Image (tube, rainbow, N blue to C red):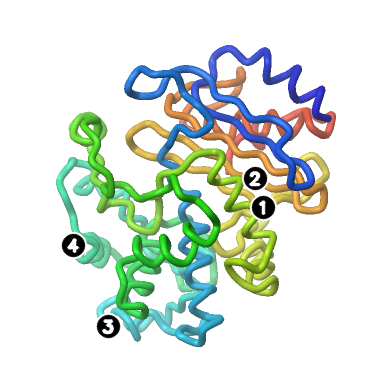
Amino acid sequence: METRLRNYLSNIKKFTGAVLIAKDDEIIFKEAFGLACDGVQNTTKSNFGIGSVTKSFTALSIMQLVEKNKLKLNDKVIDFFEEIYPDAKITIHHLLNQTSGIPNYLFDKRVQTGDDFTPEQIIDLVLEKPLKFQPGKKWQYSNTNYLLLAQIIETVTNQSFHEYVTEHILLPAGMENSFFDGEKEDNKAQYWESVFHCKPSLLLGAGDLVSNVEDLFLYDQALSSDRLATTESIKKMQSISYDGTLVKYGYGWFIKNNFGRQSISHGGFHPIGYTSHFEKFVEENLTIIVLSNKLQKNSPLGVKYFNSTDLGREIGARAFGKTAFPWQKFN
């Protein structure tokens, strides 16, 4: 497997970013490609906005609080936000597995202007619209679910979401080079905001973590131990909670069956141009982490906004001697 993967990855020409592959908890491939946003060479320690891979950190934070009896999965959202569709009986469980029916705020053109919105202002915009469906009856991906979960974490812990995740996930996992949008001074930030119309506050809990492939490997290792949560909690997150025909979702993870093997995965897109892909084939103990800072197709049928997932699935296919089909290039 290792030789097959190295032969493939040594021939990729277009990709810009970093790739890490681990088998049986040992790194078997780790390399960076192309230039970072400031024109220097990418390395495996280069940081990237990981977009929606952040959702697994938010879900894990909730599970930690459930273990501490500070939350229950069947707690109603109106217990924390009285104005959130009070008659709908939406629970934390519905937020975690994307079955709440709450509209996705990122589809609202008013938040795509580059203006700064607080989470409270974002929720006010969302509440102008009705629920998409009765909670628990359907599945629809919505960043609003995870924005609300981040705010619930803040309410329960009396910490900011960023402080909580740093203290209870990043530091215990050894992820010393990971942080959140807006936490570090960066001259590029104003340029990115003006060009791509994205403020850090827009992505709270849903896509605002910044990391690198080496730190995400440490996260993978921590998830496989009991350092961050019990085995039972991790298993619940990574098991099918919504079992649809086209989508199977846990808590912050997609549950996939590609190449005849089950995996837990999540991709991400950050509006300033980053993409990400994290996938673990659990039984084979194979982890594939891909981060990119340039939107581009990596295969003839790839889609540039999913370019890390595109490459990640090509790697997975070759690991098992299979072919990656077009419909496998998405989350």
User: In terms of secondary structure, where does tag 2 sit?
Assistant: strand
Q: Nearer the N terminus, badge 3 or badge 2?
A: 3
> In the image, which disc is placed on residue 121?
4
Q: Are marks 4 and 3 in contact (CB under 8 Å)?
A: no
- Left or right? Give the position of 24 relative to 269: right
In three-dimensional space, the C-alpha distance between marks 2 and 1, rounded to whole angstroms, equals 6 Å
Mark earlier in primary sequence (2, 1): 1
Q: What residue is disc 3 on?
A: 82
Kind of residue indicated by mark 4: Gln
Please, what secondary structure does the residue beneath circle 3 have? loop
SS at mark 1 in the image: strand
The numbered disc on residue 264 is 1
Position of residue 273 measured from the top left corner of the image (x, y, whole percent)? 37, 31
Image location of residue 279, percent across then percent down: 65, 45
Total numbered labels placed on residues in the image? 4
Label 3 environment density (alpha carbons within 10 Å; few <14, some 14–19, many ≥20)? few
Query: For the residues marked 4 and 2, what is the alpha-carbon distance in whole angstroms?
Result: 34 Å
Which residue is painted at 69% across and 28% down in the image? Answer: 314
Which quadrant, please, contains the C terminus?
Answer: top right
**Amino acid type shown at disc 2:** Glu
Tag 2 residue: 279
> Which mark is in front, 1 or 3?
1
* Residue 74 vertical position relative to residue 208 in the rendered view, above or below: below
Query: Does label 4 or label 3 sit earlier along the sequence?
Result: 3
Q: Is residue 268 above or below residue 302?
A: below
Q: Nearer the viewer, residue 220 or 116?
A: 220
Question: Where does the image place residue 160, in percent across and percent down from the top left?
Answer: 30, 67
Image-quadrant location for residue 79:
bottom left
The amino acid beneath tag 1 is: Ile
Which badge, 4 or 1, is on the more N-terminal residue?
4
